[in-house]
Image (cartoon, coloured by chain):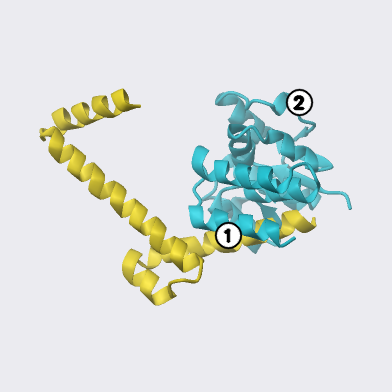
Chain colours: A yellow, B cyan
Amino acid sequence: MAAEISDRVREIAEARELPESEVFERALERGLEDLWEDLVLARYIDGELDREEAVERVGRTKVERVERERDLVEEDVDWGLNA
Amino acid sequence: MTLAAVSDAGPLIHLAEIDSIELLSAFDSLLIPETVYEEIERGGLPDGIADLSYERVEAEGTEVEFEELDAGERAAIAVAREREVVLLTDDLAARESASADGIEVHGSIGVIALGYGRGLLDRDEAASRMRALQRETSLFVTEAVVERGIRMLDKQ
């Protein structure tokens, strides 16, 4: 895995004509953004964050998407347990 | 109560990816449209499907009103409608189209819950497979939503 990461960083750096340090910085920003969104959505789903705040932090599309997922998973589990 | 279902490619692939395709044996009858079978065959038949009891069926007609869906999804909807069986799909658009058409639809998470409900899995194994579905397959579902589903298992 470590070797694969190094290879990818090198390839991206060459293709984009960037220093490898810049590739790492962008990867960290992008990864952090995903982790942040996961945390906000988890707090919203768990009732620790209200809808307006969640929308403000990650956008309406992501909140609506997670609401659809929540409804379908609840519907599925309820059905599976009672079918 | 007899439980019959027709599956499109999604649940067959996703459940196979987490070594759980055998959970489809919780259905008394499982139908796979020819179009879906050919679709998964092109990508290599999933492990475990040979040990599964299922019937390959021809869809009587693909539904013109679902043009945005792929051929396998349309065939599975057609079979579900014609035979009045549960449709198994993990595709959000297919699920919403079929639901709006009055078809009962569930996905891979529902199949795992069904396995637990029917005693094929204990609670921890069901939870572990739900997490694997989220982490190890191409099925897109938010981690927090899966954890909420797992907590529902505890309320049974």
Q: Amino acid at mark 1?
A: Arg
Q: Residues within 10 Å of mark 1 (few under 14, many from 20)?
A: some
Q: Is residue B17 toward the left or the right of residue A21 in the image? A: right
Identified at 62% across, 25% down, the residue is: B45
Q: Is residue B19 toward the left or the right of residue A80 in the image?
A: left
Nearest the eye: B153 or B33? B153
Q: Are marks 2 and 1 in contact (CB under 8 Å)?
A: no
Which amino acid type corresponds to the residue marked 2 in the rendered image?
Asp
A62 lies left or right of A33: right
Q: Quadrant of residue B149?
A: bottom right
Depth check, front residue: B62 or A77: A77
Q: Does any portion of residue B82 appear in the rendered image?
A: yes
Q: Is residue B31 above or below residue B90?
A: above
Q: Which residue is mark 1?
A: B148
Circle 2 residue: B51
Of marks 2 and 1, the one in the foreground:
1
Q: Is residue B120 above or below residue A10?
A: below
Q: Residue at x 61, y 43 (%)?
A: B128
Q: How many marks?
A: 2
Q: Is residue A80 left or right of residue B100?
A: right
Instruction: Determine the residue positioned at 82% across, 41% down.
Output: B29
Q: Whole-percent x and y of residue B144?
A: 50, 57
Disc 2 to disc 1, C-alpha distance: 32 Å
- Chain under disc 2: B
